[in-house]
Image (tube, helix red, strand yellow):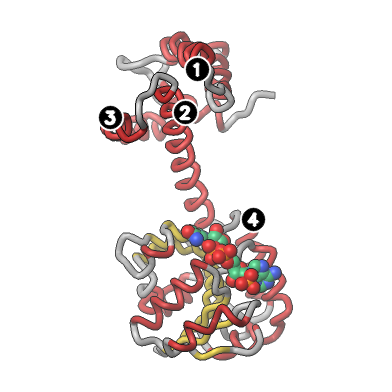
Amino acid sequence: MTNTVTVMGLGLMGTALAEAFLKDGRTTTVWNRTAAKADHLAAKGAARAATAGDAITASPLVVLCLSVNDNVREVLTAAGDTLAGRTIVNLTNGTPRQARELAELVTARGGEYVDGGIMAVPPMISQPEALILYSGSRRAFDAHKEQLGSLGAARYVGADAGLAALYDLGLLTAMYGMFQGYYQAVALLRTEGVKAAEFTPMMQSWVTAMMAGLPEQAAQIDSGDYLTDISSLANNAAGYPNLIEAAREQGVSTELLLPLRDLLDRSVAEGHGADGVARLVELLGAPAA
Ligand code: NDP
């Protein structure tokens, strides 16, 4: 097992990745389109590659972290035959389809491809709380798992290269849902002078209590049995307009609130009023015509 790694893309995240490899004493080659961003990594012991091709040939394991996958495609296409025999681990955020297309590009040139999703911000990199999801070539992941462990907790989610992006975007979807609810709530409370710092601990306790019920909802979703004796869609559809009316009364935007009202109304119109709210997953999987 070689202890040699290349990092391509030295933005905020790529720099943190390269620093984590260096911290663990790994021989690290770095490359960035704007070469000056490699200066402080070179001062810490990283080797600079003059070109992307040099960066790829320098190590069997090549970690990419660029802004978007169009840039990854451009860099890998230009790299041509240098990809043969390399493992490309692409930690750039993207979609499952993009990951699958990049896997095809790399394997067609004789390399192995692993896609990744970073569930962390740069200061968390190298800590166990930094979850990094991987999918694609199992052989390549296993061969480099120890080195990838320098970046955080490595979790392999499947051989389909698109799966890491699918999980990543799923987790981000849940995060944005939580954020948008929080911002809407704070905007409402502020209309009466309640400080965000005063309201936030109450909201954290409430959301934590609600999250405790998710495994039960997961069981309903997986079984397809949504009957409830806790809270029906009909009751939620009847009460939810109060959120919209209160926002209007207080002069707060309803932009984030309206889509869920429409979904709740559709669930009742389609005859699911007696079911629990977890049935909304079924409606989301079958968009209205
Ligand atoms: P930055 O904007 O800091 O860095 C972007 C990097 O992409 C730079 O190295 C930049 O090079 C490079 N780049 C952009 N366009 C090209 C191109 N056409 N050819 C070659 N290189 C190019 O972004 P981050 O480092 O923050 O993010 C990188 C990836 O990591 C993104 O996909 C992001 O979603 C993901 N990520 C970031 C997190 C974060 O908290 N920062 C958290 C989780 C994931 P140059 O310096 O020359 O412009």
Q: Which residue is mark 1?
A: 247
Between discs 2 and 3, the one toward the N terminus: 2
Residue sitting at 50 percent across and 17 percent down?
Answer: 247
| Real-space Cα separation, disc 2 to disc 4, in angstroms | 33 Å
Residue denoted by label 2: 184
196 relative position to 255: left or right: left
| Residue 117 appearing in the image | no
Q: Residues within 10 Å of mark 1 (few under 14, many from 20)?
A: many
243 and 93: which one is in front?
243
Q: Give the left or right position of residue 148, taking residue 108 as reference.
A: left
Q: Is mark 2 within 8 Å of ligand 1?
A: no
Question: Reading the chain from its start, which is encountered first: label 4 or label 1?
Answer: 4
Q: Quadrant of the N terminus?
A: bottom left
108 w.r.t. 166: above or below: below
Upstream in the sequence, badge 3 or badge 1? 3
Quadrant for residue 111, please give it.
bottom right
Disc 2 and disc 1 in contact, CB within 8 angstroms: yes
Which is closer to the viewer, label 3 or label 4? 3
Is the C-beta separation of discs 3 and 4 under 8 Å?
no
Q: Which mark is residue 202?
A: 3
Q: Residue at x 55, y 27 (%)?
A: 256
Task: Give amino acid for label 2.
Answer: Gln
C-alpha span from label 2 to label 3: 15 Å
Residue at disc 4, secondary structure: helix
What is the distance, in whole Å, between disc 3 and disc 4 at their CAs? 40 Å
| In the image: residue 232, left or right of residue 9 | left
Q: Secondary structure at mark 1?
A: helix
Amino acid residing under circle 3: Met
Asked if the residues shown at circle 2 and circle 4 are in contact, with their CB atoms under 8 angstroms apart, the answer is no
> Which circle marks residue 97 in the picture?
4
